[in-house]
Amino acid sequence: MTTRSVIIGTSNHMAEGSPPAMFEETYQLCWRPFLSTLYRFSDIPAALHYSGTALEWLASHHPEFIMLLEEMSTRKQVELVGGAFFSPILPIIPASDRVGQIESLTTFIRKHFGKRPRGAWTPEFAWEPSLVSTYLSCGLDHTFLPAALFRAAGFDPLGPVMTEDQGKYLLVFPVHDPGSQEEPGCLFSPLLRRLGTSTAEGSLTTVFLSDHRMMEHWEASGLESPDIMFEADFAALQREMPELEITTPGRWSKLNRSPQRGYLPCSGSALLAERSAPETKPEPRECGLMFTPRRLLVRYPESQALYAKMNYIRLLVSQLRGDKSRKKSAQDELWRGQGGDAYWHGPNGGLLCLPIRAAAYAAFIQAEKTTRLKAGFTPGIIRTDTEFGGFKEMLYRGADYNAALRTDHGALVELSSLRSKTNYVNAMGSSSAGQGRLMCFVDWISGRDAADDDLGHPSSVRYSVSDREYSSMTAQFSGDVSGLVHGVRHSVQVDKTFAFRKDSIIASWLVSNTGAEALTFRFGTQFNLAIGVQPESMTASVGTKTLDFNRRPLVDETLSSLHVENMAPPERLEFRSDSPFHLSGSLLYLPVMIRGKEQRLFQGTRFDFGWDLELAAGAGRVISLTLELSRP
């Protein structure tokens, strides 16, 4: 006699920008073996969610998978769960974009499988009560949140909750995650057996697993193939079926059982809670999963920068009038850039993976290109607080590139090539090391005898916007360094000017000794560049000589120019100075936890340009450096 109801399901997604090999690996080790094995157990139904990114790739590379999924949906073995197309962290994107992304995935599912989904998958369980209205306005009547949240909010985790927003009602199923404490290689069956000893007749247990969690289970199992693991687990479920009613969310909700009623607080997954919490203020254990997902935007400055870019591009898209086709194209790219992986350190690296950040910026740059009208566009500088930091940045919008200047550092925080759809100021350092966001044209002063590969903790130059007039094509800053530098008292003033040209940026400095004694020091500027998404996709050369970043010093002689090639997409960055400079450089890596293993991920390349100066009291020296973008 059936005493308990069970829903089993999976969530499947790959981040925009993931390498093609990672898509194929996930397909061969998870998506294909799971579905093909489930197909053979036709009496076991399941609720399956695939993001739009996953479905697009599957339709393009493995149409046979889509055909099998369609057959299983037609025979009502599989209930497809909808959601937002690019799996954004829903609370951080505007309500209209939430609706647009949800409708986009619904349209894809209806077109390929002939049915509208009724359920919505909430990526990383990033929940706010306002999502009730969002889901219901899209024709979705249920979603899923962690069972632990139900317990923390005082609800029974063995039954759904009917929640409400402005008179609209949504059914929320509590999801039990087997986690890592269960038997390696076993998925649904161990948890169901354990819960079976404590659940009453009429209870409902919902178990969902993500694709990356299933791959972890297989890797821990020691089994020869994932097919064997899925076969064993479905066979175990089949043996339990006399005591279980395995159903789907849609079928269960049609039975009109009386659910609990109440309100669920803001929340997110356990991993999102951990990796969005401020590093300096560990979250009290009793807070559990109840937190605002929006706090991920302040954990990493790179996340805040992407969020600011997203809102700026959204403004441009909203202002596009007349051409519906172009607006739809720009909107699609905006949504692509909203993919949630790029905004936090997810299970596959997310924000800490340069290719994922690069893909988000590429989508935003393409969206902006689409909004551009060639007639009537005038390059120039605007001032606005794009990053919501309380002070205005300077934004240069040009025909070939965009640039953003942070006024308190007098440094570039964005250099986006419209030709290659690359933001070159996209390198990332370790927030735990206090580095903050990595920028370009970051100026410093150090002792003249500092080794090229060890600048001896140089003193940074802090700037403010100059009181002098600036045009629509130039920006001027003033800064100074006073105090001891390598034991010698310095008093140096720096007047800095950026001049923006069609395909280049010219930075010039007037470095003045404002002290009473002569000074000898090295003045320099640092570039942290994301050129290519892997070290092999970037080369740096001086003349015909390719630089070896494992060599110290990087170069022996002073230089007047440096050529850097971005191989994919192809573009050349050329640095030229009117004065010989010393050059040091290194590749940037970051240790990142991916699926339980630490990996060193490439983040970009650092270059330091240095000029040796001897200044008498009251004397000054002018230095300039040109950065030009061109086709290789």
Image: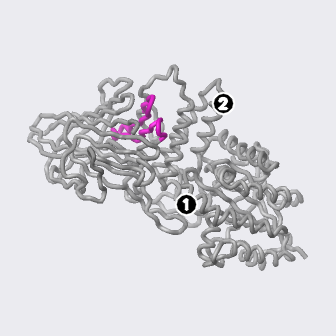
Number of numbered markers: 2
Segment colored magenta? 395-421
Judge whether 193 appears above or below 327 on screen.
below
Q: Is residue 401 magenta?
A: yes
Name the side, left or right, on which 515 lies relative to 454: left
Judged left or right of residue 511, residue 537 is right
Residue 287 in the image, given as x and y percentages of width and height: 59, 62
Label 1 or label 2, whichever comes before in sequence order: 2
User: Could you tell me which quadrant the N terminus lies in?
Assistant: bottom right
Q: Residue at x 33, y 29 (%)?
A: 499
Q: Quadrant of the C terminus?
A: top left
Rendered residue at 32%/41% (across/down): 441
The picture quadrant where one finds residue 332 is: top right
Residue 547 % position (x, y): 29, 52
Q: Is residue 299 visible?
A: yes
Q: Is residue 295 visible?
A: no
Q: Which residue is the extreme one toward the right?
A: 1
**35 and 539: which one is in front?**
539
For the point 87% across and 60% down, the residue is: 257
What residue is pinned by disc 1? 348
Q: Position of residue 480 (x, y in %)?
A: 24, 39
Rendered position, 248 above or below 531: below
Labels 1 & 2 near each other (Cβ < 8 A): no
Choose between 25 and 206: the one closer to the eye. 25
Looking at the rendered structure, the kind of residue marked 2 is Ser
Residue neighbourhood size for the residue with mark 1, other residues' Cα within 10 Å, grouped as few (<14), some (14–19), many (≥20): some
Q: CA distance from mark 1 to mark 2?
A: 34 Å
Location of mark 2 (residue): 325
Horizontal side of 300 relative to 123 (left or right) equals left
